[in-house]
Each structure stands twice: as C-alpha cells, then as structure tokens.
Image: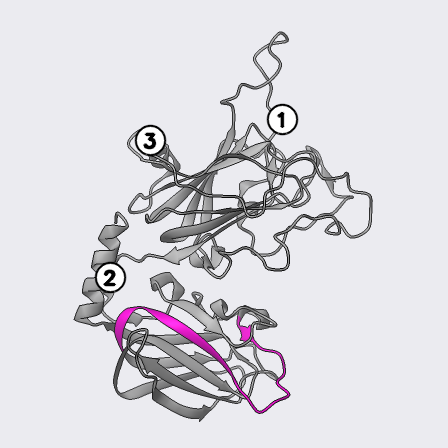
Amino acid sequence: MSASASPSAVPSYTGDANPYGGGDPYADYRGPGPAGFPFAQYADLADRRLGAGVVAANDEFFAERENLLKPEAAHFDPEHFGHKGKVMDGWETRRRRGVSAEVPHPTEDDHDWALVRLGAPGVVRGIVVDTAHFRGNYPQAVSVEGASVPGSPSPAELLGDDVKWTTLVPRTAVGGHAANGFTVENEQRFTHLRVNQHPDGGIARLRVYGEVAPDPAWLAALGTFDVVALENGGRVEDASDRFYSPATNTVQPGRSRKMDDGWETRRRRDKGNDWIRYRLVEQSEIRAVEIDTAYLKGNSAGWAALSVRDGEDGEWREILPRTRLQPDTNHRFVLDAPATGTHVRIDIFPDGGISRLRLFGSLTAQGSARLTARHQELGG
C-alpha cells in the first residue's frame, strides 16, 4: 500500500448517538452544519446516475451493500423487522467475534469491506461516510482506499495482489447517526474505492465528491461528444440559484425522469434573471446545442440564451440569442458557426428551470493536448 494523503475530518464525530426515542429520527442527527462540507460543490463521483456501483462486500448480513449509493437520504422505519432482525437502510454487517471463548473479541486488524466502482474516474476532493440511524451499531472507525484500474475489473481482479491501493482516509474514529466528512488531498485519478469499517457495523450512505478526469483516448475516439457532460469532464462552476434542485443535474447522463431531476429556481420578484456557468472538459468547438425542459411544465424557463468564453479572462460572446422555450420539450439548435471556448453560460429569463443542457462538439488541438497532459499528471 502506498503512502497516504493527509485528509482531515470536517467536522469530527465520535461515540454513540442516543437510542431512538420516537418522533423525528433526524432531530438529533449530527450533520455538517449550516455551511455544509467545504467540498460539497463538487460532483458525487459515486452517483448511481453516472454508473457507480458497489461491486462486492465481504459481508452484508443485515443490510445489503447497494444501499450505500442510494441518492436519497437514509430512511428509518422503527417497526420494520425481518427474519434476520432490524431492517436498516444502509450496509450493515454481522457482529464480529474472536476465535474462542478465551479470545472472544475481534483482533485489531479484523474489518469489513466494500468495493465501490466510481461512476466516472476522477480526482477525489472529499468523502462522506454517513452513519444515519446507526446509533449503537456503527463502525468504531473507517478507512478508505483508492485504486486506478482500467477496463471493467471483476471483484477478484480488484482484490488481486497486483492492484495498488492508496489510502485516502486513514483509519479514523467516527460517530453514530452522523455525517462523517473527510477532505482528501491527493492529485491522482481513481476508478475504484475500498471502504473499510473497523471492525464491523453499519454505514447508511457513501458520498465521494470530486472532479471527473476523463480518458483523452476515449474522447478522441468519439470525435464529437457532449463537451459539458459530467461524465466527460464538464462541470458546473456557479449558479444564481439552487433553491429547488442543484444546477449539476443539468449535466447528468440521460434525460430527466421527473421534475426534481433538473434545475429549478425560486420565483423571482425583481427584474433580473437566473443563470448557470459551466466549465467544459477542455477548450472545445461547439457545433450543436440541446436545451431540455423535460418534466418542467408550469415552471420551465420562458427564454434562454447561451454565451461562451475562452479562458478565465476571456470575453463572453453570445452564441445563441434569447430564444423562446416550450415546457416539457427538448430544443435543438445547430450553430451558424462553431463556437470555441472553455466556459459556457446559460441565462434563463426570468426564472424557472431547465432539465438538461447538451453541447455537442469536439476538443481543439490545444484542448486535447492539455487534457492529455493532465491525464498523465494524474497517473492515467
């Protein structure tokens, strides 16, 4: 195992939570506080919508490993019991035991593990190990390791002796019924994580915040692709409003399947407008645009305009003038001439929302060269 990074818990929780006494089970939940985690602006690389999955676990006696990546918050039903005991919305293993009556306790090295395939390879900036509703049955400590393995490795291949695992979160004590957050400072590209709980217990949810680091060879083979898509390395940098749903939804894979799977702002009572600013995977030539308002019917944006800039200090240039949008409709536009840039901004008027933005084009020679250099820096 290689040298570890230097993460720190933000904030740090230890110890049991109180037994559930009725009422709102989240009333005594220990979360990140009003400011949230400092890394929460990044995308969740373990999002199921990106293709993430829990590919294996050594034990899931009480609750299955797949619960770790559910997008919604953990649910607690105090009356829900099954033939194995209390049914928990998380990943929960059986209680570990020692080898004999004389040695009834597990050793210091005994632990349970789960292997997680990230939805998109990337640089991890922060990890949340959420023990919601695990009050006296959470792990004493957790640790997280990362690996970069090409292709689609099987669990057996990931557990092979030739796979190099890098410590992202060293063994650290955690608290029950709490969001345990860890910053990660490691400039490497990872495809898989190994989540360890020492010695046993339950974890409700896992969130892995970071930046997608795509494979330049794959994008080159595609030629034309969506240069703002999260899975290809695009990302949201900022937005005027995130009241009902996050702006990151607009660059998720696939079409929206319900209203809250897009971006919707609060109702404006001034004469301004709402907007999202995106960073493309790298410098690109954009040739076609899709603006989708799927499932936004009485609350879709009325009009939209697109602008592009090249570089952090470049001037914004309008490439799609203010155009009327229809509710619950996918709008397609072919640009009169390719638009070159590194950033795009969509302005909607006056408020409302869109579900997806697609920008179809290809990398410029300069963009391709920079992306390849970055891929090599990250160990790709």
Say what secondary structure mark 3 lies in. Answer: loop
The residue under the point 55% across, 75% down is 241
Where residue 207 sits in the image (x, y, percent)?
51, 50
Residue at x 43% of width, y 52% of height: 125
Magenta highlight range: 262-285
Residue in view at x 29 percent, y 70 percent: 225
Per the image, the residue denoted by label 3 is: 160
Residue at figure coordinates x 33%, y 42% from the top left: 153
> Which residue lies under the disc numbered 2?
371
Residue 106 placement: quadrant = top right
Q: Amino acid at mark 1?
A: Arg
Disc nearest the viewer among 2 and 3: 2
Residue 244, quarter of picture: bottom right
Q: CA distance from mark 2 to mark 3?
A: 30 Å
Name the disc covering residue 12, or none. Answer: none
Label 1 to label 3: alpha-carbon separation: 26 Å
User: In this rendering, does residue 101 appear at all?
Assistant: yes
Q: Callout 2, which amino acid? A: Leu
Q: From the viewer's perspective, tell me whether residue 127 is left or right of residue 289.
A: right
**2 or 1: tag closer to the N-terminus:** 1
Left or right: residue 18 versus residue 339 is right
Q: Earlier in the sequence, mark 2 or mark 3?
A: 3
What is the spatial separation of the Cα atoms under label 2 and label 1, in whole angstroms? 47 Å
Marking on residue 95: 1
Mark 2 and 1 residues: CB-CB less than 8 Å, in contact? no
Please tell me how many numbered marks the rendered image carries: 3
Q: Quadrant of the N terminus?
A: top left
Answer whether residue 307 is magenta in the image: no
Q: Are marks 2 and 3 in contact (CB under 8 Å)?
A: no
Circle 1: element type: loop
Q: Where's residue 87, x and y in %?
A: 68, 40
User: Label 3: how many residues lie within 10 Å, few (<14), some (14-19) or many (20+)?
Assistant: few
